[in-house]
């Protein structure tokens, strides 16, 4: 079973700062890694698929990178709407989806 | 507009049953695998089950195997989750979601299930 670990658990930043979120897999998952954003009271929203591809409507300030076991979600300059919880997700052991525990991005 | 709308949540006693529904619109429902994902209060996301386009394949998470049944009706653009022998730990918001590119690219707004006496 692949386990995803996200760090840090909480990231406190100011608008305009750069956010760097990490997701580490316990085994090689290739590029089968997605990232989601969830705001309070809302459903998750897909941001990134296949490690680095932005989903429809996702702004260019959001980017994903990595392969194998180490992945990064970067938001180049935080906007007020970016403060949320972010989850990574893998599917290397198809058909099961596994999610990481999440990183909360708070306003400093 | 691509949309998923869940319904059927509510309060149920431990050991009881509930059937969730999810209605799709704005895309060809019969062309996609579909999943259910849940989120317990204050917790993270847990994948529950998924179903192939033609219902031939169904898969379940370990925590619901043998108690929950996923199904679909492509003629009605609908996905279902029959939940039996419900436990307190099944209390969660349940989301239906569309699968694509090994991710879940469209989500419903969720329906809340509370298991309590």
Image (cartoon, helix red, strand yellow):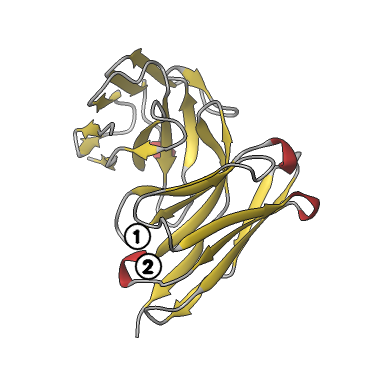
The span from disc 2 to disc 1 (Cα, nearest Å) is 6 Å
Residue at 30 percent across and 38 percent down: it is: A100
- From the viewer's side, name the closer residue of B76 and B94: B76
| Vertical placement of residue A6 versus A84, above or below | above
Instruction: Tell me whether the residue at label 2 lies in contact with that at label 1, contact meaning CB atoms closer than 8 angstroms.
Output: yes
Q: Which residue is mark 2?
A: B91
**Which labelled disc corresponds to residue B40?**
1
Res. B79 image quadrant: bottom right
- From the viewer's side, name the closer residue of A14 and A48: A48
N-term mark: 2 or 1: 1
Residue at 58 percent across and 52 percent down: it is: B108
Q: Position of residue A13 (x, y in %)?
A: 24, 34
Label 1 is found on which chain of the structure?
B
Q: Position of residue A28 (x, y in %)?
A: 29, 18
Residue at 47 percent across and 67 percent down: it is: B112
Q: Crowdedness of circle 2 by 10 Å Cα count: few (<14), some, many (20+)?
A: many
- From the viewer's side, name the closer residue of B107 and B67: B67
Q: Position of residue B111 (x, y in %)?
A: 52, 64
Residue at 58 percent across and 70 percent down: it is: B8
Label 2 is found on which chain of the structure?
B
């Amino acid at each position: 079973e692949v386990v995803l670990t996200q760090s840090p658990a909480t990231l406190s930043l100011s608008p305009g700062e750069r956010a760097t979120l990490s997701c580490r897999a316990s085994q090689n998952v290739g590029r089968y890694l997605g990232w989601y954003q969830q705001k309070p009271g809302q459903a998750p929203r897909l941001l990134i698929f296949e490690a680095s591809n932005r989903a429809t409507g996702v702004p260019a300030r959001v980017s994903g990178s990595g392969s194998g076991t180490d992945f990064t979600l970067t938001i180049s300059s935080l906007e007020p709407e970016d403060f949320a919880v972010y989850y990574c997700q893998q599917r290397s052991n198809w058909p099961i989806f596994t999610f990481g525990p999440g990183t909360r991005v708070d306003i400093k | 507009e691509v949309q998923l709308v869940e319904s059927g949540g509510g309060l149920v006693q431990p050991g009881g049953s509930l059937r969730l529904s999810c209605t799709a619109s704005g895309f060809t429902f019969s062309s996609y695998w579909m999943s259910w994902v849940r989120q317990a209060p204050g917790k993270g996301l847990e994948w529950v089950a998924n179903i192939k386009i033609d219902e031939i394949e169904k898969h379940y998470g370990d925590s619901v195997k043998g108690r929950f049944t996923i199904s679909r009706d492509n003629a009605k653009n609908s996905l279902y989750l029959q939940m039996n022998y419900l436990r307190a730990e099944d209390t969660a918001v349940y989301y239906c979601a569309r699968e694509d590119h090994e991710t879940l690219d469209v989500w419903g707004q969720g329906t809340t299930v509370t298991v309590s006496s």
